[in-house]
Image (cartoon, grey):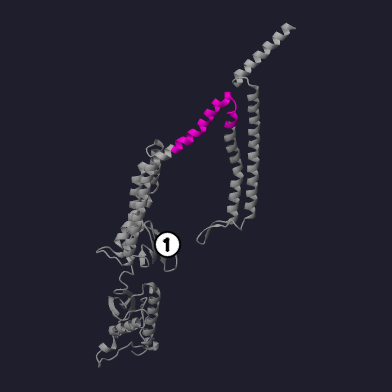
Amino acid sequence: MSGIQEVIEAGVGRFQHFLSGVLGGWHPEAFFWRILLTVIAIGALFLFIMVAHRLLRRVDAKLELWRGTRIPPIRVQTCEIISADRLTNMLKWLVRKSRLLVWVVALYVFIPLILSFFPQTRGLVTRYLDYLIAPIYRLFWGMVSFIPNLVFIAVVVVVVRYVLKVLGVIFTEVHSGRIAFSGFHRDWALPTFKLVRVLIIVLAVVLVSPYVPGFGSPAFQGVSIFFGLLLSLGSTAAIANIVAGVALTYMRPFKTGDRVRIADTMGDVVEKTLLITRVRTIKNVEVTIPNSMVLGSHMVNLSALAEQTGLILYTSVTIGYDVPWRKVHELLIEAARATRDILADPAPFVLQTSLNDFSIAYELNAYTANVKELLKIQSELHQNIQDRFNDAGVEIMSPTYSAIRDGNQATIPEDYLPKTAALKGFRILPPEIFSPGAPR
């Protein structure tokens, strides 16, 4: 028996030595408390998760109850950006995803706590906490070291903002006419402000770029080169239009509201930007023309001098040689004066542009200041010309036509003929005279 007892005592001693190697010393009471704390921690973990999930379910139910009532839509003035239903669904989705966040936070906190109960696993806790704290530590001190750069960036942003505000006020006053500079036109104010604003913003970006984290990194340089190459290859036409837009701004060939003719398009300028010019035609069709095309084609501005000296509206008629030219001038000028929106001063005038084979071409010129109604004015002018010539019994030979006439009589006005001139005409003989045997 004594031998068996010695073997048992030796086995127990070896087991205690094993436990002391594993558990840092065999202390049954301490081991019991560690196991008890582990069970309590696991219970607290599940209790925390259950309470968090219950709270999240209550929040989800409240959101469903508040749908369309306490959760209003997100609006910008009168434009609804996100409806109340969509906003509620987004909040409910965030609540559902928060359950996963609860599990992650709980495990991240309770696993180090449980491992710290046993001496053999405390080293794992240290490494575990290093993995957790090291990124936060680096992020925190990175933010602290970035504070001077952040202050510099904030100062630049504030200065640029107020400089742009002051310049905006000045250029607005120039545009309104309350501030005037010699040689600087009012319609240059807003385009010049846009150009100056872009230049100031670009200068500010250049100033603050070295103070942005990662500015000198290869990744930042690679992205900058990529976007620069993309911009240079894909914006050739846009750059050409911008350059043409700047040139058109300071050339001032037209302004918004002018009646213009650009290539084969005639209409009113409704918008003029750095890239395009929009023209609404007389048929109420909006045409968008790139500024490079505008600069490369001929432009006719019908409104430039209309309000100052008037625009000359002209039309031509051809009248026979038998009508006195003074009479034609009188009838054409009467028709012009009877037309709406034709100016009395300067007075209408007539030019004789050509002496054709069968008629004389007369060109009526009349001034008007209403360039927006050119077609209607010209149509009414043509109507009045027809009425005046019809009342006077004068035939308009437009288009020109020929007719058989009595060549024995000169086709000149009767006022130019001598009073004693004998009128001659065709001598018409009966057919019998030309029969055989008839007396001659």
Across and down, in percent, residue 72 comes to: 57, 57
Q: In percent of the image, x 32 and y 60: which residue is there?
A: 249
Main SS of residues in magenta: helix
Give the residue type that dot 1 points to: Val
Q: Is residue 233 above or below residue 365?
A: above
| SS class, disc 1 | strand
Left or right, 312 with reference to 26: left
Across and down, in percent, residue 68 comes to: 61, 58
Q: In percent of the image, x 52 and y 31: which residue is there?
A: 129
Q: Is residue 241 visible?
A: no
Give the extent of the magenta segment: 112-140
Q: Is residue 345 above or below residue 79?
A: below
Q: Which quadrant would the N terminus be assigned to in this image?
A: top right
Q: Residues within 10 Å of mark 1 (few under 14, many from 20)?
A: some
Q: Which quadrant would the C terminus be assigned to in this image?
A: bottom left
Q: In percent of the image, x 32 and y 64: which residue is there?
A: 173
Q: Which residue is mark 1?
A: 287
